[in-house]
Amino acid sequence: MAEPPAYPLATGFRSVARLNLQHYLWKQQQGYLIHPAISCMQEKSLKIADVGTGTGIWLLDLSEQLPSTVQLDGFDIDVSQCPPRAWLPSNVAMRKLDIHDEIPKELVGVYDIINIRFFLCVVKDRDPTPIIKKSLQMLKPKGWIQWTEQDLSTCKVVSAFTDADTKYTEQLKSFAIAPTPDWPVNHGSWVASMSETFRHAGLKYIVEDRNEKHSWNLSSSHDITLLAMEEVSLKLGNASGVHEMIQKAALEFENNQRGVALASDRVTVVGMKAGG
C-alpha cells in the first residue's frame, strides 16, 4: 500500500472557503483568538507565529485586534492558500516551513506566542511531542504555546429528531475515530491527553479549555466535516469506498433537514516555556 500524503486534505478555493468558515465558527464559540491566560498581550512589540497557518486567516483576524508594532508570522509547508504579499498588512508575513524539519537558526528563540491548531492530519504516530519540542525551540523564554483541536475521542452522533435515520452518519463517525489501514488518517487520540503532554515537555502554567459545539452551529460544523472527509477520500483514491459513504451521509443530512451531525469537544491547551 502506498504511503498516505503528508497532508491528505485538498488545496484550492473550496478548501480555502472551508478553512475560513471553520475559523470563524471556532472563534465565535471560543470567544477569543488568544487564550486569556496568556499574560503578555499588553506588550507592544510581541512576535507571534502561527504554525500550520493554512489560509492565514487566524493571523489576519488577529491583526485587526493588535497594534501594527506586533510582528505576525505564518508558517506552512504550502502558503499558496494565503493572500499575496501585496494584500497582507505590513506586519504580517507568510513563509514556507515544515515543522517536522530542523528549525532554521534565525527562528530559534524568536517568538512570544506560537499558535497551532487543526493538526489532526499533521501529527505523526499519534504523538505531538516532536512538534511541541520544535515549537519550544522557536519560543523565547517564558513564551507561550497555544494548541487547539477537536477531541474525536468524544465524537458522537447528535440529532434534532428522535426518529432520524443516522445510519451513514454513524459510519462517518466510525471512520473519524477508528482509521483503517487504507484510511490512514490520524484520528487524534492524543488530543485527550494534550495537557499531560505539555507537562511532560516542561511547559508551565498549563490551562485547558474544553467545550462542546453549540447547537446553533452543529449544521455548519457538519458541513465542514463532510467537506474535509470528502477531500481526504478523493486524495487517498476513495479508500474503502469512503467517498460513496460520504455522499450517502450528505444526503442523509439533507433528508433530515440538516438536523443530524457529528459533535465532539473543542479543546484549547496553553502552556508557558520555562526560563528567563
Image (cartoon, rainbow, N blue to C red):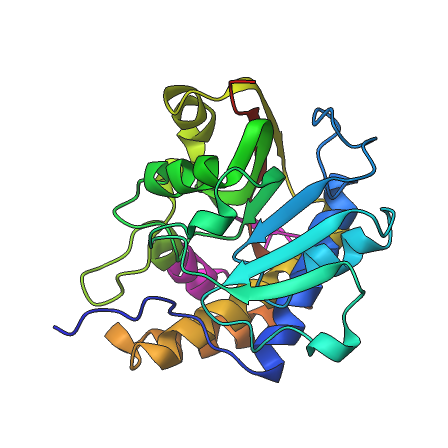
Expressed as whole percent of the image width and height from the top left, the position of residue 30 reads: 73, 40
161 lies above or below 2: above
Expressed as whole percent of the image width and height from the top left, the position of residue 59 reads: 71, 56
Queried whether the magenta region covers residue 266, the answer comes back as no
Image quarter (top left, top right, bottom left or bottom right) of the C terminus: top right
Expressed as whole percent of the image width and height from the top left, the position of residue 90 reads: 80, 64
**Magenta segment boundaries in residue numbering:** 157-173
| Residue 199 left/right relative to 113 | left
Residue drawn 45% across and 68% down? 229
When asked about the image quadrant of residue 174, the answer is: bottom left
Along the viewing direction, whichever of 122 and 29 lies nearer the viewer:
122
Along the viewing direction, whichever of 24 and 155 lies nearer the viewer:
24
269 lies above or below 79: above
Q: Residue furthest front?
A: 106
Residue drawn 32% across and 66% down? 6
| Residue 72 left/right relative to 61 | left
Queried whether the magenta region covers residue 160, the answer comes back as yes
49 lies above or below 233: above
